[in-house]
């Protein structure tokens, strides 16, 4: 059994320094903060990529230590000793040269090795298409532990089909110190935060743009980069290309309801809650979401979350739910998240999984 002070943790992740266009950074920040609070010495290694270099927003006072590297050669030259001595080394999904990184880590580390997949359904779909450049089927069996963003049946697939010695659910999380209700005034009836993706475009049109067009008096806001056709949106939909984590709370608290839309691979696998669900709920903003299997294990339908599949559902919620009911839904979802989906809870889960491995 590992004690909180007996081992150091090294995490090689996509990014912790920039939240621009990804959900990895805030997840890693909360986890590193809570691991540090529990007495762990945590080192985060990040490939220095131009996209993230232009948009770094990491608070230097955050716990843990972050180091950038420019190549596999530099990574090996500077950090081989650190990898050898750490008692837990975690490689994250979408890390550049992730296959080479994984091969090196699993050959070099003397402690436990883990793969943290913040994109599990996407990863497995990529593996089936032979398009995954950060993980191979063979590597799955070499990592001692597979930390999966998705739970449910996909865990058995990882163990029984791909040979993972130990696959465990490791959902994203929220830091309650940064996400909480704040009365700054409601400005929008419905909001949505998410980077553009083609597989979400259909639900985005149906559940946000069409309701906005049908209800011109309503006020809507969308935050996220890479949307191609903003000029065609209804005039009552405001777009913000990026909302930094420091302003996430203000963003959610300015909405009567917030919308959650799920990538198609995540819908097909189920049991894959986005970090945005936990952030919005912690801020006390009621969530309207598309449906996927396993969502009812995260939130109770009709009491902690609302489900929509058409513009009519959206407009009904926006027009018929009273302020009292809206606040009750928000309060119940917030209570659920604070009990089960905080970064502190994930830090404890990680310790338990490492002990199990």
Image (cartoon, rainbow, N blue to C red):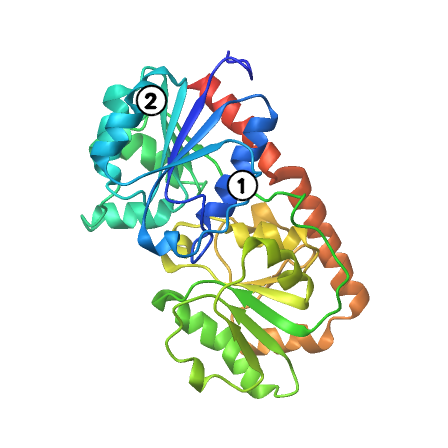
Task: Determine whether the residue tagged by mark 2 lies in a helix, strand or loop.
Answer: helix
Q: Is residue 326 above or below residue 311?
A: above
Q: Residue 143 versus residue 176: which sits nearer the camera?
A: 176
Task: Determine whether the residue tagged by mark 1 lies in a helix, strand or loop.
Answer: loop
Q: Residue shown at 25%/49% (left/top)?
A: 126
Indicate which disc residue 60 carries: 1
Could you say which quadrant of the image residue 47 lies in? top left
Image quarter in which the C terminus is found: top left
Label 1 crowding class (10 Å Cα cut-off): few <14, some 14-19, many 20+? few
Q: Residue 103 versus residue 271: which sits nearer the camera?
A: 103
Residue 291's x, y, as percent?
Answer: 51, 60
Residue 340's x, y, as percent?
Answer: 63, 38
Nearer-N-terminus badge (1/2): 1
Residue 97's x, y, as percent?
Answer: 23, 41
Q: Is residue 344 above or below residue 267?
A: above
Indicate which disc residue 83 carries: 2
Relative side of 133 to 194, left or right: left
Q: Residue shown at 39%/19% (left/top)?
A: 86
Relative side of 334 to 127, left or right: right
Label 2 crowding class (10 Å Cα cut-off): few <14, some 14-19, many 20+? many
Could you say which quadrant of the image residue 319 lies in? bottom right
Residue 310 visible? The answer is no
The answer to whether the residues at label 1 and label 2 have Cβ atoms under 8 Å apart is no
């Amino acid at each position: 059994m590992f004690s909180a002070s007996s081992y150091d943790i090294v995490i090689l992740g996509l990014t912790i320094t920039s939240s621009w266009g990804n959900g990895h950074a805030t997840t890693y920040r909360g986890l590193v903060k809570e691991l540090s609070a529990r007495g762990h010495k945590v080192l985060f290694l990040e490939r220095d990529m131009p996209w993230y270099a232009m948009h770094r927003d990491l608070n230097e006072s955050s716990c843990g230590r972050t180091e950038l590297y420019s190549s596999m050669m530099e990574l090996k030259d500077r950090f081989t000793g650190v990898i050898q001595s750490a008692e837990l080394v975690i490689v994250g999904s979408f890390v550049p040269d992730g296959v080479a990184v994984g091969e090196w880590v699993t050959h070099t580390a003397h402690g436990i090795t883990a793969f943290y997949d913040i994109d599990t359904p996407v990863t497995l779909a990529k593996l089936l298409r032979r398009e995954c450049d950060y993980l191979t089927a063979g590597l799955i069996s070499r990592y001692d532990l597979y930390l999966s963003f998705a739970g449910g049946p996909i865990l058995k697939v990882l163990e029984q089909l791909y040979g993972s010695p130990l696959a465990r659910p490791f959902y994203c999380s929220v830091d309650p110190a940064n996400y909480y209700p704040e009365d700054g005034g409601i400005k929008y009836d419905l909001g949505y935060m998410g980077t553009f993706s083609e597989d979400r475009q259909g639900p985005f049109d149906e559940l946000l743009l069409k309701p906005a067009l049908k209800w011109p008096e309503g006020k809507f806001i969308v935050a996220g980069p890479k949307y191609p056709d903003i000029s065609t949106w209804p005039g009552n939909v405001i777009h913000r290309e990026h909302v930094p984590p420091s302003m996430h709370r203000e963003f959610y608290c300015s909405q009567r309801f917030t919308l959650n839309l799920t990538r198609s691979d995540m819908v097909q696998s189920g049991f894959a809650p986005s970090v945005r669900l936990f952030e919005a709920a912690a801020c006390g903003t009621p969530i309207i979401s598309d449906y996927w299997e396993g969502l009812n294990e995260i939130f109770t339908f009709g009491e902690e979350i609302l489900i929509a599949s058409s513009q009519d559902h959206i407009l009904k919620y926006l027009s018929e739910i009273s302020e009292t009911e809206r606040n009750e839904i928000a309060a119940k979802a917030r209570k659920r998240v604070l009990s089960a989906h905080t970064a502190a809870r994930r830090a404890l889960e990680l310790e338990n999984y490492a002990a199990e491995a």
